Amino acid sequence: MKRLALLVALLAPLFALTGCHGQQAVLGGGGRDEALFGGLWQVFLIVTIVFYLVVLAGLTWAVLRRREGGEPVVRTTFYVWVGVISLTLIGLSIASWLVDRTMNRAPYTGLTVEITGHQWWWDVRYISPGHPDQTLRTSNELHLPVGVPVQVILKSADVIHSFWIPNLSGKQDLIPGRNNDIVVTPTKVGIYRSQCAEYCGLQHAHMAFDVTVEPLSTFQQWWGDGLLPARVPATPEQKAGYAYVTTRECATCHNITGTPATGQVAPDLTHFASRATIGAGTFPMNRGHLYAWLADPQQAKPGNKMPVIGLEPDQLHAVAAYLESLK
Ligand code: CUA
């Protein structure tokens, strides 16, 4: 029984590796930096496993033969051991430095995305140099073309946040008053998850978004569609929702392109219903969560900047119907 417990304790770190796969996983695959980092991680893993086994073997040997051998043997073994450790540490440092330099030399092809962190959501702007009318603003979602290095410029509107798409790249902080940047090169089509990686207040854990990596043509189509103004309300209920959203509190904070709602301090809602989540990755996009959010955003995500409006039932139905139509 004791041996079994010991075996479980020794193997425990391996079970933790089951968290290394999926849409939010540093070893999940999907990006150039992630592949470089994954290679370095495997080198470290193999080296440390070898050293772990050597230490255990040495320990066993010492316990079994503690009455034999003399001081010269111990001294020689000690010197050799210190030498091996020093050389290995130098080797690992060089490997780490080389990977870091290679990540830094990422090629850049001209696609720039500017992301501003807010407590607790992400304001995203796709920049087309020389064509300001092609700038696409969206929120809490990122679409990236596969195989294209994208420069992501990082800013903050309030406190320090950290941009991190584990499957695709390393972390980079968003710091108030300065611009940071990171180059992300996705290599595999898929949907990944990004998570704020710097504690930034009450809802830090609910500051996430989906990243859709797609073929270049699909990405260009998405960008083009994103520039279109919001859909015109079709049903009487949607029209009532449109009337409320564009003339009342909502319009002071939110922008819906093509309507009188031009607020810039909250997430852009022009194509709200095409996103996969509500509240920056907090809830899946569906009617139940949308109603809950509109009825009481402070219950849904305490501390966020959206006030409780106090919608009457018919207003709630109308606003929800209009927002759901914003594909
Ligand atoms: Cu933003 Cu943590």
Image (cartoon, grey):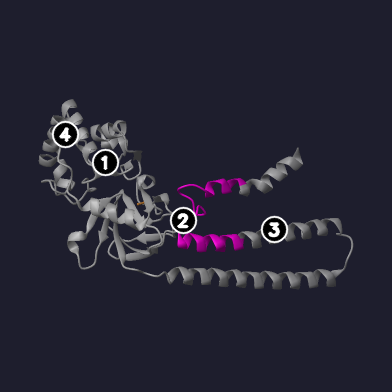
Dominant SS in magenta = helix
Residues at circles 1 and 4 in contact by the CB criterion of under 8 Å? no
- Dot placed on the residue nearer the N-terminal end, 1 or 4: 4
Amino acid identity at mark 1? Ala
The residue identified by callout 4 is 238
- Dot placed on the residue nearer the N-terminal end, 3 or 4: 3
Residue 259 location, x and y as percent? Answer: 12, 46
The part of the chain drawn in magenta is: 15-44
The residue identified by callout 2 is 30
Image quadrant in which you'd find residue 38: bottom right
Taking the image as shown, residue 249 lies to the left or right of residue 119, namely left
Q: Is residue 122 visible?
A: yes
Q: Is residue 161 visible?
A: no
Image quadrant in which you'd find residue 43: bottom right
Membership of 16 in magenta stretch: yes
Residue 52 image label: 3
Q: Nearer the viewer, residue 131 or 11?
A: 131
Residue 79 location, x and y as percent? Answer: 75, 73
The residue identified by callout 1 is 273
Please tell me whether mark 4 sits on a helix, a strand or a loop: helix
Q: Is mark 4 within 8 Å of ligand 1?
A: no
Residues at circles 2 and 3 in contact by the CB criterion of under 8 Å? no
